[in-house]
Amino acid sequence: MDSSSQQGEGKKNINAVKTFPVPFALEDIKKNININTNPFSKFSKEQLINQAIQLHQKGNIPEATKCYQYFITQGFGDHRVFSNYGAILQDLGKSQDAELLYRKAIEIKPNLAIAHYNLGNTLTDLGNLKEAEISYRKAIELDPTFAIAHYNLGNTLTDLGNLKEAEISYRKVIELDPTFAIAHYNLGNILNDLDNLKEAEISYRKAIELDPTFAMAHSNLGNILQGLGKLQEAEISLRKAIEIKPDYAEAHSNLGNILQGLGKLQEAEISLRKAIEIKPDYAEAHSNLGNILQGLGKLQAAEVSIRKAIELNPDFAMAYSNLGGILIDLGKLREAEVSFRKAIELNPDFAMAHSNLGGILIDLGKLREAEVSIRKAIEIQPNFARAYYSLSLLKIADKNKILQNHLFSKSILHNKLKKDKIDIYFARANILHKEKKYEESSKYLTLANKLKLDIQPSKPEIIFNKSKVLLIESNKKEINQKEQGKSPESIFIVGMFRSGSTLLESILSMNPNVDDLGEIKILEESFFVSRKINQSLTLPEEYLKRIKDLKNQSNITTNKNLFNYQYTGIIAREIPNSKIIHCFRNPLDNILSIFRAHFTHGNEYSSSLVDCAKVYLDQDEIMTEYKNRFRSKIYDLNYDLLVSDPNQEIKSLISWLGWEWDNKYLSPHLNPRSVSTASSVQVRSPINSKSIGGWKNYKDMLKPAMEILTQADKYRDIAS
């Protein structure tokens, strides 16, 4: 949620000077003002002071000022003179002078609550919050019904980080004045910060009931509703805030965040760009836009946006953390590590940054350091769901069981969003799997994936339609491949997720001439660019250009975007010097591994066993078609055979590639490369066949997938 700036607006101190406002600011008051004293001589001291107060009440600040200055020079020792003149100077921004006058008023009349209150306001302006707290408390001691003093005390306590005490102050304000809309609003802010989202919702709704045009309350209500998982209601609240205040940059930014949660990424981008148009120096909006662009796959643009946020606010820890996430997607893992460490340097208690650092250290093979970082995240934020999930991926022994006991407690689920519950359920499933409690693990896997589908439904038909379109495209007229020998060798690893592709990539990258590109989408991007009207570059030219843009000078590249299986025909026909390796394994082992993997946005089918089976059959059918047409260009790599007899299978593969044999290909776990996939932990272990046949432990859970697979003749007996 992006509500910090809104909360700041809501907590402006309300300055009260007795019973009248002082709305005017005027030019600097001259120190030596000539005052006609004749009119003053006709009246008593009390009459003169009352006359000055009347001028002040009517807004005649220059004349009131002359009177107060005259009284002070004449030695009038009246608290009202010093207190009210202090109020004028405070409105002029002369806080230090105002402080002296308020202190003089208090010296004359120690029990003057308004003077203690206004002194508190002045001390707040001067940044002396501790002293301001003392002054507000004194004002309240003298007048317990002084609602605005309770309110400003709440603001000061909030700024001091004393949220529980601030909550008490705001509740007292509301008790004294139930119609005080801003007090309800600020109470909502406090309750939000205290993770009491349901009560925060009630407070914001009360503020809106009292003031339906309170744009900030509508906006923050939207944030709370988002936190409670009520995204449609949240969208309505944010749109209402914008309707009331169209130039409300923060509301546009927050709407963008909610639209992102609803999967409306294009609309979210529009909202974030509107926020930036209204407020170009709005660092949070630039950072949020970067997140949206990342979700849209516009990684370079996302990086630019996040770096702009950092340029605007070099101390913006969240932006550094977000930048780290984008750098991971760009394959710049070591830069990502630096970014996460910078976020932690700026905010040592930033639990998410510690957790993200742990994730990148896993990818870099620094598993011990990763464990330390993730445990630090949990130490800072004991209920941090994502950190528990990351920790559950590591092969560690938690001897005291404290963290594990908490992970399985009811309290960790209290007030948790769906996305957090998903992480917790996957973490529980992983722990139970390690303990070989497969039936219980099945229960949590099912719960986790059901919640994922509630948030983002599976749409496998998009995958199937794309496969058909690209199959048709590959059947078009033959492409003339020129100068094939001069092109670098392009190896494409295709197939299903969790089919052994990461292990294969590690094996191949033991060759010093190989540069593994990871799972980047440059082939698909190159394809769409090359098909544009008036595009001068062909697909291979565009693809090779993009590889060079990655500062890649290697003779051989491996591209492990597995869904390139849909482009197999186009690769075989159009990319010079290309080779395709199709990874596959037992379908039920494959589907189980996908269902357990907790994939991110864009792979929603992975949360449905039925759709996993359908996608498996789609790639199997498509690859069979392409193998019939391009047999010499495609190598079959059976993962089950690879891990059962690595010596034979790897030698066969290296021979097909035409490479010179080296025994180092048999030890891919010694490869120091970074791995940012779901297999980042497993790939650090020697090749083994432990996962073969694992589906039998989850046989009951996998029945929906079996029903789909057995409809194909090839897999009719798969479960026997």
Image: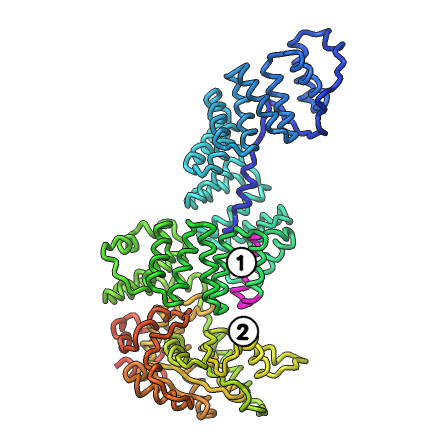
**Which residue does the image show at 50% across and 42% down from the upper left?**
205
Q: Position of residue 530 (x, y in %)?
A: 61, 80
Queried whether the magenta region covers residue 188, the answer comes back as no
User: Tag 2, which secondary structure?
Assistant: loop
Q: Which residue is mark 1?
A: 259
Residue 618 in view: no
Q: Is residue 670 above or below residue 106?
A: below
Q: Which residue is mark 2?
A: 550
Q: Position of residue 697 (x, y in %)?
A: 25, 72
Q: Nearer the viewer, mark 2 or mark 1?
A: 2
Q: Is residue 380 above or below residue 306?
A: above
> Mark 2 or mark 1, which has the lower sequence index?
1
**How did the renderer colour the structure?**
rainbow
Q: CA distance from mark 2 to mark 1?
A: 32 Å
Q: Is residue 708 above or below residue 203?
A: below
Q: Is residue 174 above or below residue 328?
A: above
In the rendered structure, which segment of residues is drawn in magenta?
283-300
Q: Quadrant of residue 623?
A: bottom left
